[in-house]
Amino acid sequence: MVKSVIVVSITLSIFTGCATNPVELETRQPSIVIDDTVVDTSVLLAEQAYISDNQLFIQFRHQSDTIDSFAILPEPDETLTAGPSTTLFLQQAIAQYNDLPLAPLSYIEPEQWIEHTHELQALPVAGVALWREFRDRLFASITPREPGTGILVEFLKQEELFFYFDEHGLLHSVALHDKPAELSTADTFKFSELITEATPLLSEYIIAARGAGAPALLFNTGDTADYGYPFIYANHNSGQVVFLRRLPENPECRGPTGTKLPQALVHTTRSHIECFLRQPIGSVARLFTLFSHKLVDTVTPKSVVFLKDQPIPPVSDNKPMDPEAWELELSELAYSPLSQGSIEYLVDGKNFFPRLIDAIQSAQESIDIRLYIFDNDDYALKIANLLKQRSKDIKVRVLIDGLGTISAASARSASMPEEYEPPPQIIRYLENNSNVDVRTVLNPWMTGDHTKTILIDNRIAYLGGMNIGREYRYDWHDLMVELRGPIVDEIQTNFEKAWRLQSFLGDFRATLYRPGDPVNEPQPDHIPIRLLYTRPGDSQILRTQLAAITRAKQRIYIQNAYFTSDDIIYELAQARRRGVDVRIIIPYQSDSGIIDRSNVRAINTMLDNGIRVFIYPGESHIKGAIYDGWICLGSANFDQLSLRMNKELNIATSSPVAVQGFLDMVMLPDFEKSVELKEQLPKKWSDFLMEMIADQL
């Protein structure tokens, strides 16, 4: 059996809260301890464990203290609802009890606990050495032995470890951000799924411990932190696996994280003043665009009310629009030339971020990042640390929207460890003790740069909906594409102009910039790709998608979290009356409460007009659409800011291979996961007000 040469543990900082005194357990025969490995006295080490129905009691040692704790295990159906495994907090015996994250917790007085201990059944406790043996056997069975590759294992949204075999056949594990640059990630796994799928292997260890007649086993993992996962409960009969961590004795002792409102106000004031020095022409152009669009919308409203008397026919079996004729028309509509390259879809953070980290580690010349948000959470700091490290060897530039990043710093991911304290400003963090060059996009008239592109050595480009932060890695459903070929030269030129724009007299510097010779040559397998923009006075993304809706004859499939454009909803209603199959995916929850309520009115309006609406469970941040045989995807929402005011960047193509790939990897799976609405959503009196506000965003 091959042993890992590096200890695998999930180590987080210990919370020092307001302590309480433990209650002594009634003296009983101890549980079976399969091994008695001596470990560091700072670990949380279970000495006894008992179970009665769904109540789990654990007596563990932390340094010199013996602590009695318990948790209410979820019922098997609750476990299945939450996933194959779940996480619970251990409650100290006399703590004030709160609800557990995934299962209701009943208040149990210490006296009641002591009274019922005679009903408890001793639970076998496996020591740390046995846990490590099980863990190593599990990881060795899934880690590829091919040189240059390894696997990523994500531990409960807290840690990411990279496993690989060296040339001597020894299994190694390192933090993903510290893996050797020459190794690439072959596959990504969630540890919670791995351990529940490894039933035969897990059964060996549970059966070996059944001398006490128990069908279950408690593993000591050797974790040294209160915020780690020191115990894992596994039940052989039910297949239930529960990860247990210690609850801070008094979470109320933590101070508030604070608001970023003063910082946002300072940045907004600075934007309106400084932007006239950086971008005198662009600032005036944005103001003119803002007023002109408001005037046009007021004078020429498009309301589906005008269509209510028109019948809604069944979906027709029409032939799709001619892709060649459509691409010729696009060249005139978009003022954007047709380029070429390759597209690879990277769905969700588990597929995008390991690929991004591989690319950052192996970059030879430059890394150019342009984002709406570079968060200051724990995962964003891992990327920041990697960029700081690479900046010692190559050129690293980061261009981030000021208001977007400040706003994101005020929010907190639901999966964020409670003990994490973020740095005050990610910009200073990136610049401190590094050669990372950071520029901030100003936000005149509350507009910004919503573009998301990352360029590696001017050879690889990533584009889509993801920023850098914990939500994009762990919490949200989202999409990025990896692009190669001549299209990357165009994205690089776009970055260079945006970079120069955020400097003194940036308007003139960006206008005078002339790109060098292209570095990417066309390849036989490349497909036609077009870049589409939203820029002050040039709403290419809106213009081309409205044209695609009016010309579509067969199908329109759209996924977007923000649906506030009356123009788009009107044209979709018109398309449905032409017999086009119109389907929309909207997430159950977005990152804006105003948008959620505005979406209710949009959804009900679409249902009234024969449009099929699907609700994606959870948060989807994908922004993509299929119009017959043409796809358009990227950073743009279907709201006024993305379609008319902010800077946005999408890609579009009529390539049958790319269209089918987007359909197979994104749209069809998401239709399957979503729930189709058959009746209207309940309305609130305030929804009309929320829609009026959202229409301006």
Image (spheres, rainbow, N blue to C red):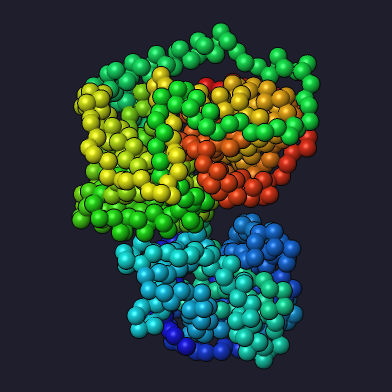
| Residue 529 visible here | yes
| Residue 450 visible here | no
Give percent across and percent down for residue 572: 65, 26
Q: Quadrant of residue 508?
A: top left
How many marks do you count on the picture? Answer: 0
Give the answer, above or below, for where 657 lies relative to 111.
above
Give percent across and percent down for residue 275: 29, 23
The foreground one among 176 and 337 is 337
Give the answer, above or below, for where 128 lies relative to 468.
below
Task: Name the side, left or right, on which 633 lies relative to 283.
Answer: right
Give percent across and percent down for residue 132: 48, 81
Give percent across and percent down for residue 68: 58, 74
The foreground one among 120 and 140 is 140
Q: Residue at x 66, y 87 (%)?
A: 207
Q: Residue at x 42, y 16 (%)?
A: 289
Q: Quadrant of residue 467?
A: top left
Q: Residue at x 68, y 49 (%)?
A: 672
Q: Residue at x 52, y 51 (%)?
A: 347
Of all residues, the one furthest to the top in this rendering is 299
Of all residues, the one furthest to the bottom in this rendering is 211
The foreground one among 585 and 48 is 585
Task: Name the side, left or right, on which 175 lies relative to 552.
Answer: left
Task: Name the side, left or right, on which 360 lies relative to 560.
Answer: left
